Image (tube, rainbow, N blue to C red):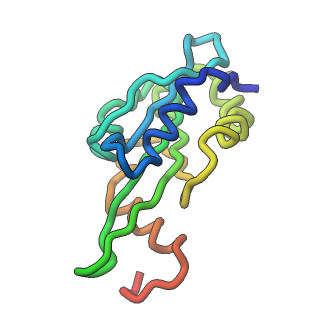
């Protein structure tokens, strides 16, 4: 089991969800290579671009991000994505093996999201790709997506 008991995780999650906050992502990393305790590594306001820059190819991490996109000229939607990151240079076989079990624990804290994205390369987190997945997950689409 992943240790997600740090109150800072829930506080960061609520901050990302708050309409009154500019914060639009939180990044969670393991406290150490041998630990199953997750800690808040970074929060930010730069969205997917900033989050992607922070991801370490040698680590496994979790992230929660708010994505805003327009359906038409009059409306904007805000949706949330849960990102499960396993960098392609992550050497820890045990970490890779445990990540699916740990994902269930993370989902107990980062509860509300439109899509779940499993990513191994930073290209997996392109804004166009994420928005397309969100539109498909959103139900009725009148713009042909």
Find residue 76 and report its horizontal and vertical position in percent: 32, 70
Q: Residue at x 27, y 42 (%)?
A: 46
The image shows residue 73 at horizontal and vertical percentages of 23, 80
Q: Along the horizontal axis of the image, is 118 left or right of 41?
A: right
> Is residue 125 at least partly visible in the picture?
yes
Q: Nearer the viewer, residue 63 or 68?
A: 68
User: Is residue 124 shown to the viewer in this render?
Assistant: no
Residue at the (65%, 36%) spot, across then down: 106
The C terminus - image quarter: bottom left
Q: Is residue 31 above or below residue 27?
A: above
Q: Is residue 94 above or below residue 111?
A: above
Q: Residue at x 32, y 35 (%)?
A: 44
Q: Is residue 133 above or below residue 66?
A: below
Q: Nearer the viewer, residue 4 or 17?
A: 17
Q: Position of residue 28 (x, y in %)?
A: 50, 28
Q: Residue furthest front?
A: 20
- Image quadrant occupied by the N terminus: top right
- The residue drawn where x is 44% and y is 35% is 26
Q: Position of residue 22 (x, y in %)?
A: 30, 43
């Amino acid at each position: 089991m992943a240790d997600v008991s740090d109150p800072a995780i829930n506080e960061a999650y609520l901050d990302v969800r708050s309409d009154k906050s500019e914060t639009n992502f939180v990044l969670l990393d393991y406290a150490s290579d041998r630990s199953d305790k997750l800690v808040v590594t970074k929060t930010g306001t730069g969205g997917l671009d900033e989050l992607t820059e922070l991801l370490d190819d040698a680590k496994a991490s979790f992230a929660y991000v708010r994505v805003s996109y327009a359906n038409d000229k009059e409306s904007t939607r805000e949706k949330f994505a849960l990102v499960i990151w396993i960098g392609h240079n992550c050497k820890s076989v045990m970490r890779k093996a445990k990540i699916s079990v740990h994902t269930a624990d993370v989902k107990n804290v980062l509860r509300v999201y439109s899509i779940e994205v499993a990513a191994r390369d930073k290209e997996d987190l392109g804004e166009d790709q994420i928005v397309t997945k969100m539109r498909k997950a959103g139900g009725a689409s009148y713009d042909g997506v």
